[in-house]
Image (spheres, rainbow, N blue to C red):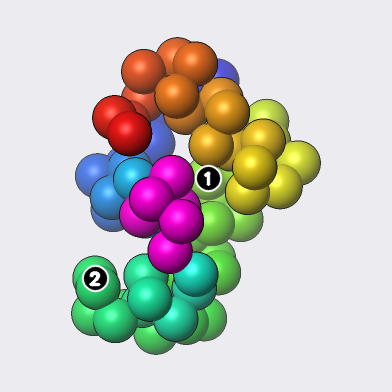
Amino acid sequence: MKKLTEQETTILHLIVRGCNNTQISQSVYISIHTVKAHISSIFKKLGAKNRANAVYIALKNNIVDE
């Protein structure tokens, strides 16, 4: 598992909280396109297949808090 950037960690935390791409975009002031790029990078770094899997991996490995 590769280390996430600060921005990726912030986005992953928002995913764990149940935010959708639009909510993430508005929360961190980036475009939806950029959110999607970060999420893709997060999935690759974690080895996750989808959002639910990324949440599981993040919580299991204490990458983010609930």
Residue for point 54% across, 57% down:
39
Q: Amino acid at mark 1?
A: Ile
Residue at mark 2 to residue at mark 1: CA–CA distance: 16 Å
Tell me the quarter of the image containing the C terminus: top left
- Spot occupied by residue 61 in the image (x, y as percentages of width and height): 45, 15
Residue at the top extreme, as displayed = 61
> To which residue does mark 1 refer?
42
Magenta-drawn segment: 14-19
Q: Is residue 44 visible?
A: no
Residue 47 x, y percent position in the rendering: 67, 30
Quadrant position of the N terminus in the picture: top right
Q: Residue at x 43, y 45 (%)?
A: 16
Q: Earlier in the sequence, mark 2 or mark 1?
A: 2
**Residue 65 lies in what quarter of the image?**
top left
Nearer the observer, 19 or 8: 19
As drawn, is 42 to the left or to the right of 24?
right
Q: For this rendering, which residue is in front, 36 or 56?
A: 56
Secondary structure state at the residue bearing disc 1: helix
Is 40 left, or right, of 65 in this rendering?
right
Q: Which mark is residue 2?
A: none
The reply to whether residue 25 is in sight is yes
| SS for dot 2 | helix
Can you give x and y, in whole percent of width and height, for residue 62 in the image?
36, 18
Q: In this picture, is 6 found above or below 39?
A: above
Q: Is residue 58 magenta?
A: no
The residue type indicated by label 2 comes to Val
In the image, farthest residue toward the right: 49
Tell me: residue 38, above or below residue 58. below
Q: Is residue 3 above or below residue 13?
A: above
The residue carrying mark 2 is 28
The answer to which quarter of the image holds residue 4 is top left
